Amino acid sequence: MPSVKITPFKKVLIANRGEIALRVIRTLKEMGIASVAVYSEADRSSLHVRMADEAVCIGAARSAESYLNIDALITAAKITGADAVHPGYGFLSENADFAEAVTKARMTFIGPTAVAIRLLGVKSKAREIAVKGGVAVTPGSNGVVGQNYREVARKIGFPIMIKATLGGGGKGMRACLTEKDLDRMLKTAQAEAKANFGDDRVYFEKLVLNPRHIEVQVAADNYGNAVAFAERDCSMQRRHQKLLEESPSPFVTPTVRKKLQEAAVKLIKAAKYRGVGTVEFLMAPNKEFYFMEVNTRLQVEHPITEAVCGQDLVKMQIEIAQGQPLHITQAQAGVVHCHAIEHRINAEDSDHHFTPCPGTIEEWVPAGGLGVRVDSHMYTGYTIPTYYDSLIAKLIVTAESREALLARSSRALGEFVVRGVKTTIPFHQKIVTHPEFIAGNTDTGLIERMLAEQKNESKK
Amino acid sequence: MDTKLITDITNWLKTTDLAEFCYQKGHNSIEIKTREALPEPLQSTCHLTAVTAPALGFYHAAQKGKSLVLKEGQSVKAGDPLGLVESATKKHVVSTPIAGVLRVISAEEGKPVEYGQPLFFIEP
């Protein structure tokens, strides 16, 4: 074990906006570390600007000129004298060039090394690491497909998934159910990959029907220690966008939970990963699970893990970056204190294809009470800019059992008042009262089935 | 209510330079205001054009080894350089979008500036 070297931070710049910027500032305050907010011209009246100790305008409204502008962010950190940068999620959080630029400017990037981001960011590379580390992966092409793609697809067996090597968020991803669709689907996926990521390389994976999306939060320090937390079930997705996450999964038994955690730790150690991260698995109806990818950042849904294990993950992330060894054991990390759900409240019209509805919040009365946490950057009179994502709040609900949890979620959603913009609150209310969700039948197709039901009902 | 009368009065008012006309039937009260009687609107419009920082960074009047002397009251042409803002890896040129007289210089040599911060005010 290398000797422990701790460099405490005095000031941290948060290279992000919205609720996650607030989330990080709150922990920094509790740790006695000064915070620097950065903002675009469209975010002048944003809450993170007010809550931070200092705030710097870094560019125009468009993300490319502000929150994705590495040069401006590094300049802001230098001018304000920050000694570390927290990337939040989204924007530059998984950008190896940014991590490298921060390090080059002699500051600490609160996250994994640029090398680890690059390695795990390329999905085919991440699969190779998993295979070498002895973690099960879905049968697939084991790398980028070339001229012999038809042969490769046949060997895996249909149905297959075509995925962009640099993909994410469902882009450059196509399901191919039979061989006759292969050429057409391959072309579509490649074109989409080229358009979105500037790289048309794709790989194949076996398509697991009716799967669950199960992910495991991990934390690893600079000294080779790694722990895994209780899983999060993120199966409630619409077009690969998560709407609701819960922990622990109603489908995972204690035995399977242990296996998941062992697999996640194996993988993270094989990748020599440092920081907090998430290992995503696809779980088949027979509870077999396959490694999908590693998210090398703090996740949107991290609060449900915080609730279940009773730890502050942002604090842990900062401590690891400061060089502190992990202060918890696997037994402490893996504990299940309660059941938790996160409802992603978006300014979207769920009756009309979840179209974003930016606008001014005329009234904002968030839910409260026992077992309710609201992470949000909204306030009455705030105007949601059109430039960024539509997430306006994360409603995190906890209870001692899943049954009590669903009742509490329904209660909290019922008292949440947002006027001025349409939100996904009514849709969340439908989810928590839906018989299949109550029964725990939460595979990745459930949301689409619910939407189909909704459509049929409105036709009647 | 006689809406025709109201329409007639409104149309007639438009032909005059009266600003306000009140009429009450009960106690035969009539009140007429001319434009001069109205309070002067505040002259809040600023006739100066701001030249703002094109990026976050440090302001310098000129590149290292060169000099540029700017004085309040001097005239400038559209596109004239007024210095540069140096960020971590780039140099962003500051130039005036319009011709006029340099009225206010708020930029200070070597000081950090935010994106969009006014550095100069030009009178067209």
Image: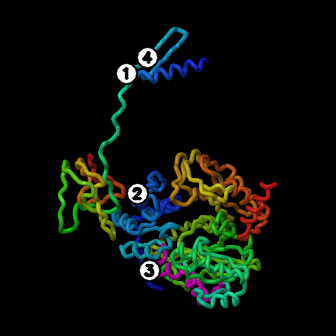
Task: State how far apart marks 3 and 4 are (Cα).
Answer: 87 Å
Residue A295, image x, y percentages: 56, 74
Foreground of the two, B99 or B81 = B99
Chain identity of mark 3? A
Foreground of the two, A31 or A62 = A62
Amino acid, disc 2: Ala
Few, some or many residues within 10 Å of mark 1 (<14, 14–19, 20+) = few
Q: Which residue is mark 4?
A: B32
Residue A387, image x, y percentages: 51, 58
Q: Are marks 1 and 2 in contact (CB under 8 Å)?
A: no
Task: State how far apart marks 1 and 4 are (Cα).
Answer: 10 Å
Q: Are marks 3 and 2 in contact (CB under 8 Å)?
A: no
Res A163 → quadrant: bottom right
In this rendering, would A269 be left or right of A102? right
Residue depicted at x 32% and y 63%:
B57
Q: Which mark is residue A4?
A: 3
- Which mark's residue is nearer the viewer, 1 or 2? 1
Range of the magenta residues? A111-137
Chain identity of mark 2? A
As displayed, is residue A232 above or below residue A377? below
Chain identity of mark 1? B
Amino acid, disc 1: Ala
Res A130 → quadrant: bottom right
The main secondary structure of the magenta stretch is: helix
| Furthest residue toward top | B27
Amino acid, disc 3: Val
